[in-house]
């Protein structure tokens, strides 16, 4: 008889094989896997007492904490659907998501309660609000509530691998966010592939940098728990605090966005901490410039791994880990390879196709859209059949990311469809231009977007944050780019600002930057 692939297996394995090992370190709280499991059982009993049954949605608005992580397994045990919420939305966004998801219970961190306080009276279907780490009028305080239930083995709901495990809302750049339905099977098989490619082991200590509501942030509790790794919580993205925790707890692996890595490297240069253990950083998001990779591996002495994916595919499908035939390449060539999206992971088929659905030539030049068939593919968008059918066609999921492929089947993302700059009929990759800007020693962060132009339709514009104490003129930086790029690709103008707008995970929000330059023009801003 086949055993269903359900996510509760992962904690079961950790308890059986690593029960007395530190599982969670959350500031001054350290719990073993047995202690974590006890709290999970208490949580499941509490949810059952609230009337939560199989298929009910349970929402979480919390930073990376013990309470957030134990929520996954506590919800799964009753057959509920975990619905994590982005911590940087507006009250109206929370109202929409909580209504749309039909969430029955909301767990919210005390520090974030103000974000939802005004909309709670407008959510009659939300039956219970439970607050982590504090007390709020009309809400239940988490720890006393949890302590009132037994930590003995919980009689779980009967789970099938096709049951929905999580409902994850993607960022809405036009209109409302879409809810991605992922099954236990999709999450399980993705975790199995990812833990292999990232070489996850019981000797790892993970620092939870990516928020657990975020793509690949919610995957970490699965593959690190399954392997009995120690998991260190991080409530906010503070590079100084990150370095302190890396040193104090012997952290060996971190997942983060490129901009967060940039912040961490800046802090590292200033503090120069003595970190003895091997560390690897897993970077997901926009492609980093090879200069990032060089700095991580040469200056910090850490291992750099670039991965690629999206929420709709559980989320990862490629990795840039060097293959055996690449190990003897010159250092700069290896850094260039590591900065690419890489090659497909086990369990995923990845193709780059043109507008007719035909695979592009593997010449490193022909641009197409990344499509994939994978075990991690979503069941669809919740209550949005039209968007589902537009994204999944003939069994392939269309990502919206544009890329090229070389003769070694290595994929390199050149842009999001909406971020490709079409100037006078020429396609310009904003990522390529950003990589050149990052080579300038005065540049800390950069984003390149299209701006309107009477003659060429649109042209590239750079928005740049300079390193502290550095100065460089707009003309100097444009000339720097023109020396390294075809002239039509170089920014036509540069704006210097103190800080780029970012998501909670540290991803630069180009849509906000681009929109500011297109106000009053006819181009549709995606």
Image (cartoon, rainbow, N blue to C red):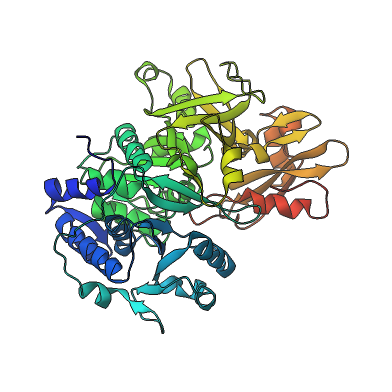
Q: Residue at x 44, y 64 (%)?
A: 103
Q: Residue at x 83, y 55 (%)?
A: 520
Q: Position of residue 406 (x, y in %)?
A: 53, 18
Query: Quarter of the image holding residue 315?
Result: top left
Query: Quarter of the image holding residue 462?
Result: top right
Q: Is 305 in front, or is 318?
A: 318
- Above-or-below relation of 68 to 257: below
Residue lying at the far right of the rendered structure: 454
Q: Is 472 in front, or is 500?
A: 500
Q: Position of residue 65 (x, y in %)?
A: 33, 62
Q: Residue at x 54, y 55 (%)?
A: 503
Q: Quadrant of the N terminus?
A: top left
Q: Is 54 in front, or is 274?
A: 54
Q: Is residue 204 visible?
A: no
Q: Is residue 44 visible?
A: yes
Q: Position of residue 16 (x, y in %)?
A: 12, 48
- Above-or-below relation of 437 to 93: above
């Amino acid at each position: 008889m086949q055993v269903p692939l359900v996510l509760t297996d992962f904690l079961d394995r950790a308890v059986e094989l690593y029960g007395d090992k530190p599982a969670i370190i959350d500031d001054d709280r350290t719990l073993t896997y047995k202690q974590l499991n006890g709290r999970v059982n208490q949580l499941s009993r509490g949810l059952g007492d609230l009337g939560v049954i199989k298929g009910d949605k349970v929402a979480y608005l919390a930073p990376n904490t013990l309470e957030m992580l134990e929520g996954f397994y506590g919800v799964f045990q009753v057959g509920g659907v975990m619905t994590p919420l982005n911590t940087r939305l507006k009250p109206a966004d929370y109202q929409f998501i909580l209504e749309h998801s039909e969430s029955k219970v909301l767990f919210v961190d005390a520090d974030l309660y103000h974000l939802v306080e005004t909309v709670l009276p407008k959510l009659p279907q939300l039956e219970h609000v439970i607050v982590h780490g504090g007390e709020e009028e009309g809400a239940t305080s988490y720890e006393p509530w949890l302590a009132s239930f037994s930590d003995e083995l919980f009689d779980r709901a009967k789970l099938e691998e096709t049951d929905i495990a999580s409902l994850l809302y993607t960022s809405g750049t036009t209109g409302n966010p879409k809810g991605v339905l992922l099954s236990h099977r999709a999450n399980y098989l993705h975790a199995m592939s990812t833990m292999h490619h990232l070489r996850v082991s019981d000797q790892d200590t993970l620092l939870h940098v990516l928020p657990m509501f975020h793509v690949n942030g919610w995957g970490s509790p699965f593959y690190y728990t399954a392997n009995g790794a120690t998991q260190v919580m991080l409530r906010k993205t503070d590079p100084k605090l990150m370095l302190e925790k890396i040193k104090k707890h012997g952290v060996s692996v971190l997942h983060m966005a490129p901009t967060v890595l940039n912040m961490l490297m800046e802090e590292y240069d200033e503090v120069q901490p003595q970190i003895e253990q091997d560390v690897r950083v897993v970077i997901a998001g926009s492609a980093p410039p090879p200069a990032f990779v060089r700095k991580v591996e040469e200056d910090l002495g850490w291992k750099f791994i670039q991965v690629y994916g999206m929420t709709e595919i559980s989320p990862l499908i490629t990795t840039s880990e060097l293959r055996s035939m690449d190990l003897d390449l010159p250092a700069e060539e290896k850094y260039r390879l590591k900065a690419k999206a890489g090659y497909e992971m086990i369990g995923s088929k990845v193709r780059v196709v043109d507008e007719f659905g035909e695979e592009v030539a593997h010449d490193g030049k022909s641009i197409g859209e990344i499509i994939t068939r994978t075990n991690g593919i979503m069941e669809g968008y919740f209550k949005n059949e039209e968007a589902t059918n537009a994204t999944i066609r003939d069994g392939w999921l269309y990502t919206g990311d544009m890329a090229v492929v070389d003769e070694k089947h290595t994929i390199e993302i050149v842009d999001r469809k909406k971020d490709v700059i079409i100037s006078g009929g020429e396609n310009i990759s904003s990522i390529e231009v950003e990589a050149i800007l990052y080579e300038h020693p005065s540049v800390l962060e950069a984003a390149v977007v299209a701006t309107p132009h009477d003659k060429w339709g649109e042209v590239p514009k750079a928005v740049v944050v300079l390193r502290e104490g550095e100065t460089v003129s707009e003309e100097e930086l444009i000339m720097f780019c023109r020396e390294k790029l075809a002239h039509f690709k170089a920014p036509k103008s540069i704006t210097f600002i103190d800080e780029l707008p970012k998501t909670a995970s540290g991803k630069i929000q180009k849509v906000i930057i681009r929109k500011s330059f297109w106000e009053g023009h006819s181009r549709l801003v995606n």
